[in-house]
Amino acid sequence: MRQNLRVNGARLWSRLERLAEAGALPDGGVNRLALTEADRQGRDLVVGWMRELGLAVTIDAIGNVVGLRRGREDGLPVMMGSHIDTVRTGGRFDGALGVLAGLEIVQTLDDAGVVTRRPLAVAFFTNEEGARFQPDMFGSLVFTGALPLEKALATVGVDGAVAGEELARIGYAGEAPVGRPNVHAYVELHVEQGPTLEAEGCTIGAVEGVQGISWTELTLNGQSNHAGTTPMRMRRDAGYVAAEIASYVRRLARDIGGNQVATVGALTLTPNLVNVVAEKALMTVDLRNTDNERLMEAERRLADFVAKTAKAEGVTVETRSLARFDPVAFSAPLVHRVESIAREFELSVKRLPSGAGHDAQMLAAVCPACMIFVPSAGGVSHDIEEYTAPEHCAAGADVLLRLVTELAA
């Protein structure tokens, strides 16, 4: 195997720009929510590239797409991949880089006349973001058997659409089976989505694992009343309870410390009028930690505070879990090899955890898995300003190329 192979960074960048046209926003971002028309356009484009490269394309029953490059021998493939769906005001790099870098690696090997011993696969998974259908990592959960297909297909999205019906509508309800993945190893290149690499002047992140994630939806039911005539002591104010919870969530993260983070990302009041005490508040709380014991402590403390605060105000609470994933540690030998390859290429490298969830954490349950991070400018992601420099995209793809060719040899 040639040790001096490098990707064509300009070709990778060109594909990133082309894919960004599917669901492009006027101000430069991307809105490619899962299983929408924009997602179909993006899928068609990537599948077209897969077929141009001679990959054997399969689509499974939840719409995950896998392109297979044959090896000299049959056997389990080394898989690269990520996702191409975005949040409503997303960027061009989140997910897309990992998928398109996989295609670039296939083309680089083709150009060099290199055939690996093991097959190589490039995959993109359905609804990784969870922005339209929950939970996030939806497709890879079904792919690995952690989420039943029937339950996933019946999932109702935030817009009232049913996942299975939308899959059929866009033409990506495939026939390949799910829940029995046959993968030798999985490697995912991704933008960091945080500020650490850029702040420390590092080009490559050797990702040690993924934080545990706990998403909870709270429905607070009080009593609507006149804002001017209702004494404070007689109110059942759902808005007040929501505000107390939002404030507590920030204090909770500070108190637990370490890698604990906590966010109230969505809050809606009803009737949402300036002169009316809110009768209902619908809100979400996102808790994350690399330590599962501390994450469970945060969950317990939040639940206690919500119950106590709501009771004191005469407000009732309905709680719904939207997602719950334990922290995941990636394969130690693969993490070490990412670090070593970066140094061999004279690229600055840092070990770090991922603060965001990724498909790789689901694949880690069924095969050795790891991730490679490259810097996000300003630490910005899930935003139209998301940006990763072309040279960083290429550097990450070069590390990915070396690692997967070693694994496939």
Image (spheres, helix red, strand yellow):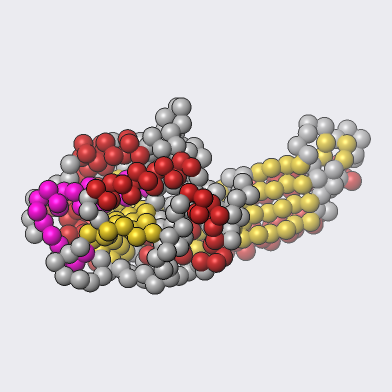
Residue at image location 35% in from the left, 39% down from the top? 19
Q: Quadrant of the C terminus?
A: bottom left
Give percent across and percent down for residue 379.
Answer: 39, 40
Q: Let me know if residue 289 appears in the view.
A: no
When the figure is inspected, residue 226 is found, relative to residue 247, above or below; the finding is above
Residue pictured at 45% horizontal, 27% vertical? 27
In the image, the segment drawn in magenta is 94-119
Q: Position of residue 214 (x, y in %)?
A: 55, 59
Q: Does residue 40 appear to the left or right of 263 in the view shown?
A: left
The magenta stretch spans residue 112: yes
Question: Hey, which quadrant is residue 29 in on the image?
Answer: top left
User: Which residue is outermost to the right?
Assistant: 229
The overriding secondary structure of the stretch rendered in magenta is helix
Q: Quadrant of the N terminus?
A: bottom left
Of residues 62 and 346, the one nearer the viewer is 62
Residue 302: percent from the left, percent from the top?
64, 58
Classify residue 148 as left or right of residue 314: left
What x and y, as percent, mark residue 277? Answer: 82, 39
- In the image, taking residue 104 as reference, residue 44 lies left or right, namely right
**Displayed quadrant of residue 172:** bottom left
Q: In the figure, 143 relative to 12: above or below?
A: below
